[in-house]
Structure formats: structure tokens, C-alpha cells
């Protein structure tokens, strides 16, 4: 195949239809048929052959007789009809996706759109790599997101199983229900863990943020001896495998709990909360140190000297000058610390007693023992909370960038 | 005297003082169980009635029975026992009792006599397998199959599981050698009474693995009891083994097209152990609860919520109907004569000796 320059205005095919578009679309159709055929109950080989024939016929008709827009809708209509006869509503949905993909592929290849985005002098290999790269990026995105998206419709299942029932696939309202959400908000087995999570996470976050911010400020001073070593120790909870930290914490906090109960007269329940909060705070500190240290890099130390020069003591300087400027870093560190505590299951399983059972703990046991879709309802809620929190972090980051861009020097 | 010593002294004094005037029973109790439908049945049958009689008591549940042995060992080592009463299967109770982690009990002293006047020892009979374990229920590991995937001739014997021609499709089996190896040998023509003699030899083990090999690529291995009902509901497997109560809830409560196959069901026990080393007031509370929760009426009540047979002989005549669905529970009990025509009595003692060895061989076989 020689590389011929592409002229978008003419929209003329670069390669002869029979040796380029037709075989490629047929191969693509065979691939889709291979997957779709198995779903429809055909054998893989029959599916592939069937798909290849359909795709070839479509490619021929579409490119010869129909303009792009009509042709793509036509391809979708044909595939939906075939899917509907083969597998009812679910088949029609499958056909819709396959038809859209096929129709797009035919024109994409035939009109030379596949060269769009690469310079005209690019070789065949470069064009191939450019498109493979785009495909790989799409696939990575798909594999990251698809498992999370799947749980959302499943959480509205009317049945007590992790199954897309036939009623759900037919979009029958009877197949959907909010009962798993209702279970979450009315069942004590879920409300108590929710309450525990909401007690433990804010306290742990508060401790992480206070200690982490102070540590970051101290460690950013050049005169502190052994800064790197101290930093490494403080960040270690993030690097050491969690199960190892958890095992160590189990024995450490067991002794500490006994001390609190026997010598300080603290009740067993309160000492349990203190243990989990301290353990989670230790896990959150590295996140705060890292984000605050990153913000401090752009902090102008001469501002503190200027404040001192004007008679402010270090505490006033910290709250009036330094803190407002590094606040975005402190807040995003705090959010990470919060999510760490809110999502954490390993350490709490070791350190906590049943009275401190958190939401992830309940999800973990619930998943193992009963596979109840209530877990999916909770997961959906948590995903939404996480998205909200990350949006806040992103907005703060942009704000801080904007401020930094405006500040002189 | 420094401030610190003053503090310690006053704290110590107040501790002694409160200790002297405190009730002799703690009001907090942490119960460890399995979660799910089984824990619900315990809650309804005896925890809620007990709390009604003792409103000052506060019960916390921990669904950690699956790792009870490991966790109790760790707690014992750290001298920090946070559990008061632990629900475990018989084989775990054997280990915990042997290691001295579970407390030895004088059953006739701490348990209630049967309603028919029999002593606890007689009432539980040979289900009392050691000095620590108070059995609550008899359950079985047995098979369920999809009624719409087996054609017109539903399976009738456990050997149909090994018959890929008659019943093509995937099967779910538990990821452990126990039961699977016995079923394999039984279906390879070994007489029921010879199963453990044959399994004790290398040739016998090879024979069992060879039989399992014939279906290996059609097996989905499960580890949690909830997996098989899920796989059956999805139609991913044609048949699968699990605990009979899980199948009951899928069939009766979730209305799934599943049917039970009781042939060669494997009986097992589940019950309570009390951890060694509880504080005296904790132990007093636990013993009070234990006596109540394992009496004749309470064990019979539990059978109204889940299809497991009560461990007391005197409870059997009291088993009635399902609490909310109103159906007769007897046909769903593993111990019902109609279901127990051909039973596999799983041998704890034998498995205690061979478990480690066969576990390793089984894992190696799986990885082949």
C-alpha cells in the first residue's frame, strides 16, 4: 500500500474499495459476529462467518448507494431488526451497538477519515500506530469505568441476586425497585456501620490534617536535621503493605487498649473508637504531608520573614499568612485522608472490635456471606460521594493554579 | 506525691469501688456469627426474646465466624478477647477446644434440661462431640439444580453430578476436599461404609481424583455459601452443592426455579463456644444467655426461620411452620426421614487426621 496524500474536500477513497475497505470491514464484522454469535447462541465460527458476510454486504451497499448519514442510520436499523428477531429486546440493544459500530467503521475507512489527525506525509505504519494508540487509550478507559458503571443499574434490581434479570433487560418497571436502598437506610445492620464510619473518618481526618500540616511545614525548613529520614518514616504507612501495618497495629493497639481500660478507666467502647481513629489517622498523615509539601514548594518564605518584620509572632504568621496560601493543599490532603479512613477495611478488621464496625467492613462481610444487592446500593452511594469529593479537589487545584498564576514572582 | 501517682491511685480506688458495687453480670455482649439468613434466624429465635426479658443488655454482632479460629488465636495471643460467644462449625470447635482457646463446659450444669425432663447430655446425645461445643443445629451440604435446565428427567442421585452426558453444563462444588472426595469415590462404586478406608490409601485418593478429573473442566469452585444460589439464579451452573438452608431461601423465599437433591447429603453441626479468659461478669452474662438460647423451645423456634434441624432431640416434635410464609418446615429439614434416606455421615475424626495432607493434595490437583 502506497501512502497517497489525502484531500478531505474531495472525500475520494484512497484505496480501491475491493482491496481495502471491503476486507477490513469484513474482518471487523467477523470479530463482532464472533462475540455477538456466542451471545445469540450460534457457534463462534458460524457467528464469525455470518458477521463477515453481513459486514461485507453492508459495506458494499453503504459506500456505493447511500450518503454517510443515511447509511449509518440504515446500518443501525438493519442490525436492530436482525437482533430483535434473534434475541428480542436484548438482541435489539446488541444490534443497535453493533450496527452503530459497523456503519461508523465503513465510512471511517472508505472516506479516509482514519488519516485525520495525522499529517499527510505520515507513512502507513504511522497511521496504523496513531489509530492503535487511540484504540488502546479507549480500551483503558473502558476497563477502568465499565465495572463501576455495571453496579449502578444492578443496585436497582428487584431480586436479591447480582443478576440482570429478563425483566430488567426488557426495561420492565417491575424488574426494578428501590428496596436495596430502603434496606440500607432502615436496617440497623447498615445504619450502625454508617454511623461508625461517620464518627471515625472525621476525627481521623482532623488528626491527620493537624499533624500532617505541621510536619510538612517543619520538614520544608532547610535547617531541620535528618529531614529525608523523618519524611521516609512518616510516609511509610503508604508504602508498607497494609496487611503488615495492620498486623503490627493489632498487637500495638491491643496493649494500648488494655492500658486505657485498666489504668485510665476508659470504657471498652470508647477505647475501641480511639484505637481505630488513631490507626486511621496514621494512614492519612502521608497523604496530607505529600499534598501540603507540594503546595509549600510554591510558597514564598520571604512572606513569613516580612510578617515577622512587622511584628507578628510565628503563630499569627501561620494563621494569617501561611495557612490561607497553602489551604488548597491542606484541604485536598484532608479529603484524601477522609477517603482513606472511609474506604479502609483491612486495618479496622484487625484493630476494631465489632462495636466499631465500619461501612467497608460490613460490605466485606456482607459480600462474603450473603451477596446481597444492598452492597450495590451502598457502593453506588459511595461512588457518588467519591465523585463529589474528587470534583472538589479538582476545583481547588484549579483555584490554586489560578491564584499562583496571578501572584507576582 | 506527684500528680500522676495521685491519678493512678484514685483511678485504682474508683475501679475497686465500682467493681465492688457493680452488678455481677455485664450488660454488653458481643456475639459472633455467620451473617445472612442464619444470623437472622438466631436474632429472631432467641436474641430478640432474650433482649425483651433483659432490656438493659446491649448485643453487638460480629459476622466473623468464617475466620473465628485465626481471630481467636490472635486475640488469645494479644490477651485481648473482644468476643463473648462464638458460633462455629464442629471442626473449628474441635481445634479451638484442643488448643485451650475455647472454654470447657459442664453441660449438665450450664445448659437447661430438655422439656421432656431429659438431661442436656442425653438430649443432645452423640452431637456433643467434645467438652466445649454446644451444638444448635444440624445442617447439610447438599445439591440444588435448575429445574428448567435438566430436561424432563431431574437428577435423583448424587452420581448425576458426575454424569456430563445426561446433564451437560457447569456444576458448582466447594473448594475443599471434604465431601467432594467421598462423593467421587461413592460414584466410582465404593461402598458407603468403606469410603474412609479407601480414602485413607494412596490408591483410593488417586481414584477419587481420577473421578473428579472427569468433570474438572465443568466445575465452578465456590468458597462462600452464598455463591451457589447466585450461580444457580444466574443459570451459570446446572447444579451445585451448598448448605441446605441457602437453597431453601433461594427456592422458597426468592422463588427461584431450583429444586433440592438430597441424595448423599453430608451432615454437619454448628453451635456455640465460649472463649477462655473472659472477665467474670462477662462470663456470667454469656452463660445466662447460653442457657436460654439452647433450651428446647428456642432451638425449635429457630427452625421456623431457617431449614436447619435443631440439635436437641426434645426440640424435634416442636418444629412447626415457617414464621412468615406459613409453610411446613419438615420437608425442608435435612433430618426429615423423607430427605434422609441416603445420608453421608462426614467423619470429623478421620478428617482431623488427614485434612492437612489432603488439602495440600487437593490444591495441587486443582492447579494441574
Image (cartoon, helix red, strand yellow):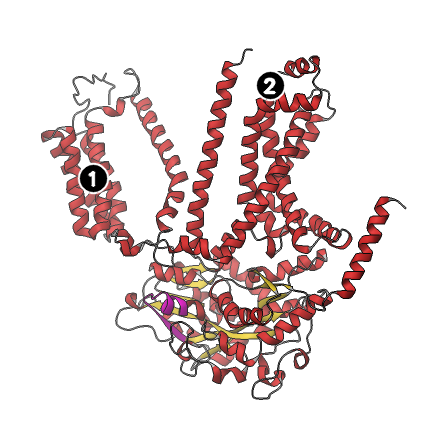
Check contact, mark 1 vs mark 2: CB within 8 A.
Answer: no
Q: Is residue B10 visible?
A: yes
Q: Residue furthest right?
A: B1
- The residues tagged by marks 1 and 2 sit, at their Cα atoms, a distance apart of 56 Å
| Residue A305: quarter of image | top right
| Placement of B118 over or under B39, stated as above or below | below
Q: Residue at x 73, y 26 (%)?
A: A226
The residue to which callout 1 is attached is A99
Q: Is residue B129 left or right of residue A109?
A: right
| N-term-proximal mark, 1 vs 2 | 1
Q: Residue furthest left?
A: A65
Instruction: List x then y, in percent, for residue A376.
Output: 42, 50
Pointers 1 and 2 within a single chain: yes
Mark 2 belongs to which subunit? A
The residue to which callout 2 is attached is A299
> Foreground: B333 or B293?
B293
Instruction: List x then y, in percent, for residue B310.
Output: 51, 78
- Mark 1 or mark 2: which is in front? 2
Q: Residue at x 46, y 41 (%)?
A: A385
> Could you classify mark 2 by the number of other residues whose Cα lies within 10 Å: few (under 14), some (14-19), or many (20 or more)?
some
Instruction: List x then y, in percent, for residue A122.
Output: 30, 18
* Magenta span of residues: B248-262
> Foreground: B222 or A208?
A208
* Magenta segment includes A220: no
> Foreground: B47 or A61?
B47
Q: Residue at x 73, y 49 (%)?
A: A256
| Residue B56: quarter of image | bottom right
Q: Is residue B103 left or right of residue A56?
A: right
Q: Is residue B236 visible?
A: no
Instruction: List x then y, in percent, for residue B330.
Output: 42, 80
Amino acid at each position: 500500500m502506497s501512502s497517497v496524500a489525502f484531500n478531505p474536500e474531495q472525500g475520494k477513497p484512497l484505496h480501491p474499495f475491493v482491496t481495502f475497505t471491503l476486507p477490513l470491514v469484513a474482518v471487523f464484522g467477523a470479530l463482532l459476529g464472533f462475540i455477538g454469535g456466542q451471545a445469540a447462541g450460534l457457534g463462534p465460527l458460524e457467528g464469525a462467518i455470518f458477521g463477515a458476510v453481513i459486514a461485507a454486504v453492508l459495506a458494499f451497499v453503504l459506500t456505493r448507494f447511500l450518503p454517510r448519514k443515511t447509511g449509518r442510520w440504515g446500518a443501525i436499523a438493519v442490525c436492530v431488526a436482525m437482533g430483535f428477531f434473534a434475541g428480542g429486546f436484548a438482541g435489539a440493544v446488541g444490534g443497535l451497538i453493533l450496527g452503530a459500530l459497523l456503519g461508523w467503521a465503513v465510512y471511517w475507512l472508505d472516506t479516509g477519515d482514519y488519516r485525520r489527525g495525522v499529517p499527510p506525509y505520515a507513512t502507513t505504519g504511522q497511521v496504523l500506530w496513531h489509530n492503535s494508540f487511540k484504540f488502546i487509550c479507549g480500551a483503558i478507559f473502558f476497563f477502568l469505568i465499565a465495572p463501576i458503571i455495571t453496579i449502578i443499574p444492578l443496585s436497582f434490581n428487584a431480586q436479591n441476586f447480582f443478576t440482570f434479570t429478563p425483566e430488567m433487560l426488557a426495561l420492565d418497571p417491575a424488574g426494578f425497585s428501590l428496596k436495596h436502598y430502603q434496606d440500607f437506610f432502615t436496617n440497623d445492620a447498615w445504619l450502625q456501620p454508617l454511623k461508625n464510619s461517620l464518627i471515625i473518618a472525621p476525627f481521623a481526618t482532623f488528626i491527620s490534617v493537624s499533624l500532617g500540616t505541621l510536619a510538612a511545614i517543619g520538614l520544608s525548613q532547610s535547617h531541620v536535621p535528618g529531614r529525608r529520614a523523618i519524611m521516609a518514616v512518616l510516609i511509610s504507612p503508604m508504602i508498607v503493605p497494609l496487611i503488615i501495618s495492620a498486623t503490627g497495629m493489632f498487637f500495638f493497639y491491643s496493649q494500648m487498649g488494655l492500658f486505657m481500660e485498666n489504668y485510665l478507666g476508659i470504657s471498652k467502647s470508647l477505647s475501641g473508637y480511639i484505637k481505630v481513629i488513631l490507626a486511621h489517622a496514621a494512614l492519612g498523615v502521608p497523604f496530607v504531608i505529600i499534598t501540603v509539601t507540594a503546595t509549600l514548594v510554591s510558597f514564598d518564605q520571604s512572606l513569613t520573614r516580612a510578617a515577622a518584620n512587622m511584628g507578628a509572632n510565628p503563630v499569627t504568621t501561620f494563621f494569617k499568612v501561611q495557612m490561607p496560601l497553602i489551604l488548597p493543599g491542606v484541604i485536598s490532603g484532608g479529603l484524601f485522608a477522609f477517603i482513606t479512613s472511609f474506604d479502609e477495611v483491612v486495618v479496622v478488621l484487625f484493630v476494631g472490635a465489632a462495636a466499631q464496625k465500619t461501612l467497608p467492613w460490613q460490605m466485606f462481610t456482607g459480600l462474603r456471606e450473603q451477596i446481597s444487592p444492598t452492597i450495590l446500593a451502598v457502593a453506588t452511594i459511595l461512588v457518588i460521594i467519591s465523585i463529589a469529593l474528587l470534583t472538589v479537589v479538582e476545583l481547588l487545584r484549579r483555584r490554586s493554579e489560578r491564584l499562583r498564576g496571578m501572584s507576582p514572582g | 506525691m506527684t500528680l500522676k501517682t495521685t491519678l493512678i491511685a484514685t483511678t485504682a480506688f474508683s475501679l475497686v469501688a465500682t467493681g465492688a458495687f457493680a452488678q455481677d453480670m455485664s450488660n454488653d455482649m458481643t456475639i459472633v456469627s455467620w451473617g445472612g439468613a442464619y444470623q437472622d434466624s438466631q436474632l429472631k429465635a432467641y436474641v430478640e426474646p432474650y433482649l425483651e426479658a433483659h432490656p438493659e443488655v446491649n448485643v453487638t454482632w460480629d459476622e466473623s465466624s468464617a475466620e473465628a479460629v485465626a481471630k481467636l488465636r490472635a486475640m488469645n495471643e494479644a490477651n485481648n478477647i473482644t468476643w463473648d460467644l462464638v458460633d462455629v462449625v464442629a471442626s473449628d470447635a474441635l481445634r479451638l477446644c484442643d488448643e485451650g482457646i475455647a472454654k470447657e463446659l459442664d453441660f449438665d450444669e450450664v445448659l437447661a434440661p430438655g422439656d421432656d425432663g431429659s438431661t442436656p447430655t442425653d438430649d443432645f446425645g452423640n452431637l456433643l462431640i467434645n467438652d466445649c461445643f454446644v451444638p444448635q443445629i444440624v445442617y447439610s451440604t447438599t445439591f440444588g439444580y435448575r429445574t428448567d435446565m435438566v430436561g424432563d428427567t431431574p437428577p435423583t442421585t448424587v452420581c448425576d453430578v458426575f454424569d456430563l452426558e445426561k446433564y451437560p453444563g457447569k456444576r458448582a462444588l466447594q473448594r475443599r476436599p471434604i465431601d467432594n472426595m467421598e462423593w467421587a469415590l461413592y460414584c466410582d462404586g465404593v461402598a458407603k461404609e468403606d469410603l474412609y478406608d479407601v480414602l485413607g490409601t494412596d490408591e483410593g485418593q488417586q481414584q477419587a481424583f481420577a473421578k473428579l478429573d472427569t468433570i474438572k473442566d465443568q466445575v465452578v469452585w465456590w468458597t462462600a455459601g452464598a455463591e451457589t444460589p447466585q450461580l444457580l439464579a444466574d443459570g451459570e451452573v446446572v447444579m451445585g452443592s451448598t448448605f441446605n438452608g441457602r437453597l431453601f431461601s433461594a427456592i422458597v423465599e426468592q422463588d427461584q426455579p431450583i429444586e433440592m437433591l438430597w441424595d448423599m447429603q453430608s451432615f454437619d453441626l454448628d453451635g456455640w463456644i465460649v472463649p477462655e479468659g473472659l472477665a467474670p461478669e462477662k462470663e456470667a452474662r454469656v452463660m445466662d444467655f447460653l442457657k436460654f438460647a439452647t433450651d428446647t423451645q428456642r432451638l425449635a423456634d429457630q427452625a421456623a426461620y431457617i431449614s436447619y434441624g435443631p440439635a436437641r432431640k426434645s426440640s424435634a416434635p416442636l418444629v412447626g411452620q415457617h414464621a412468615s410464609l406459613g409453610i411446613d418446615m419438615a420437608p425442608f429439614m435435612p433430618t426429615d426421614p423423607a430427605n434422609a434416606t441416603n445420608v453421608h455421615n462426614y467423619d470429623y475424626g478421620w478428617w482431623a487426621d488427614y485434612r492437612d495432607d489432603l488439602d495440600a493434595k487437593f490444591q495441587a490437583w486443582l492447579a494441574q
